[in-house]
Amino acid sequence: MSNGQGQGNMGGNRPGAGPGGNCVCPNCATIISHERGVPCYEVNCPKCGTKMRRE
């Protein structure tokens, strides 16, 4: 039996966080919609070129 300490499906700032949400630039705070199947860390900010992060 489980003790309730598993990973769960909580979303957040990690790979595989789900299809929804946004990508945010840590440099200039530009926000774009997350594209399903494309990790935010592989997307460059359209304004400054910095790698995006998951919001």
Image (cartoon, rainbow, N blue to C red):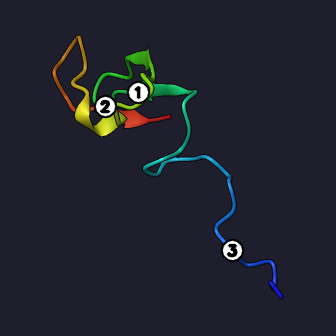
**Looking at the picture, which amino acid does disc 3 mark?**
Gly
Q: Amino acid at mark 2?
A: Met
- Mark 1 and mark 2 residues within 8 Å of each other at the beta carbon: yes
Labels 1, 3: front one = 3
Q: Residues within 10 Å of mark 1 (few under 14, many from 20)?
A: many
State the image coordinates of residue 41 (x, y, percent, origin top left): 29, 38
Q: Which residue is mark 1?
A: 24
| Image quadrant where residue 5 sits | bottom right
Image quarter for residue 34?
top left
Estimate the x, y position of residue 46 in percent, counting from the top left: 23, 12
Q: Residue at x 69, y 62 (%)?
A: 8
Asked whether, in this view, residue 44 is left or right of residue 30, the answer is left
53 shown above or below 47: below
Q: CA distance from mark 1 to mark 3?
A: 28 Å
Of the two numbered discs 1 and 2 on the same chain, state the one appearing first in sequence. 1
Residue at the spot 48% in from the left edge and 47% down from the top edge: 16
Residue closest to the eye, 37 or 12: 37
> Within 10 angstroms of label 3, few (less than 14), some, or many (20 or more) residues?
few
The percent position of residue 11, horizontal first and vertical second, equals 61, 46
* Lateral position of residue 1 relative to residue 33, left or right: right
Q: Earlier in the sequence, mark 3 or mark 2?
A: 3
What's the mark number on residue 10? none
Is the N terminus in the top left, top right, bottom left or bottom right quadrant? bottom right
Between 30 and 14, the residue placed more toward the observer is: 14
**CA–CA distance in space, label 3 to label 2:** 28 Å
Q: Nearer the viewer, mark 3 or mark 2?
A: 3
Q: Residue 45's x, y, as percent?
A: 25, 20
Residue carrying label 2: 52
- Mark 3 highlights which residue? 6
